[in-house]
Image: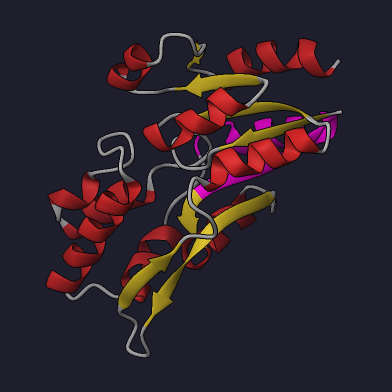
């Protein structure tokens, strides 16, 4: 029995924080897990920037409402789900994900949550579990699933390494070069070519 575990941003949808940066003009919000490997450092920086600029959860959600999945992402998800199980493992947040999950056909998503003050300020983030992607893959393996994992960033590496088959999708050269043992793909057809023989 197989299961595909995939990252969300950079694999199926654009990076949310980059879109927020573009809409607000705050360049520092362009930093993602492709740039900073320590997720806590990255999130503390983001929360401080939101406070400094008086950005509320509603401001971020307005940006997300305008975003669409990457080209052919929904069709690829439909194909995977027609063949086997799919779980999206993301370091995004419940308060962000809804509109994007709807556009992707409501695949299963494991992610984190935010603490929101009554006035809409984002006061903190709450991890479902530290290194949650790796733990999810290991849990699937403990249930005797053969795990195929896909991701693009530093926060995906432990998940890819824990999987039976780990695949980079459109990673930056710096990460790709740092982990040369992981296969690299740039199109959904290339991922499908790896997955299909495993699940058939």
Q: Please indicate whether residue 163 sits to the left or right of residue 47 in the image.
A: right
Image point (68%, 17%), residue name: 192
174 relative position to 51: left or right: right
Residue 71 seen anywhere in this rendered image of the structure: no
Left or right, 110 with respect to 42, comes to: right
| Magenta stretch: includes residue 88 | yes
For the rendered model, the colour scheme is: secondary structure
Residue in the foreground of this view, choosing between 106 and 128: 128
Residue 125, placed above or below residue 54: above
Residue 176 can be seen in this image = yes
**Quadrant of the drawing holding the C terminus:** top right
Marks counted in the figure total 0
Which residues fall within the magenta stretch? Answer: 70-90
Q: Position of residue 91 (x, y in %)?
A: 47, 50
Q: Quadrant of residue 191?
A: top right
Q: Toward which corner of the image does residue 24 lie, by quadrant?
A: bottom left
- Residue 68 percent coordinates (x, y): 49, 47
Which residue is at 49% across, 23% downward?
A: 169
Front-lying residue, 188 or 174: 174
Q: Residue at x 56, y 42 (%)?
A: 133
Image quadrant holding the N terminus, namely top right
Q: Nearer the viewer, residue 168 or 103?
A: 168
- Image position, residue 176 (x, y; %): 37, 16
Q: Residue at x 60, y 43 (%)?
A: 135
- Magenta stretch encompasses residue 29: no
Does 200 appear above or below 108? above
Percent x, y of residue 34: 32, 34
Of all residues shown, which one is farthest toward the front? 142
């Amino acid at each position: 029995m197989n299961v595909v575990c995939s990252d969300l941003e950079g694999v199926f949808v654009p990076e949310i924080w980059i879109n927020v940066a573009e809409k607000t003009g705050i360049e520092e919000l362009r930093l993602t897990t492709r740039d900073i490997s320590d997720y806590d450092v990255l999130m503390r920086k983001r929360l401080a920037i939101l406070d400094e600029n008086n950005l509320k959860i509603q401001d971020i959600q307005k940006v997300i409402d305008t975003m669409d999945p990457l080209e052919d992402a929904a069709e690829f998800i439909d194909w995977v789900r027609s063949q086997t199980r799919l779980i999206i493992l993301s370091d995004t947040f419940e308060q962000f994900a809804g509109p994007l999950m709807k556009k992707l056909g409501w695949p299963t998503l494991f992610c984190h949550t935010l603490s929101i003050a009554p006035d809409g300020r984002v006061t903190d983030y709450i991890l479902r579990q530290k290194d949650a992607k790796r733990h999810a893959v290991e849990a699937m393996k403990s249930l005797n699933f053969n795990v195929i994992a896909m991701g693009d960033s530093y926060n995906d590496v432990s998940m890819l390494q824990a999987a039976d088959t780990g695949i980079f999708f459109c990673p930056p050269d710096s990460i790709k070069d740092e982990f040369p043992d992981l296969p690299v793909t740039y199109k959904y057809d290339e991922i499908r070519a790896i997955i299909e023989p495993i699940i058939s």
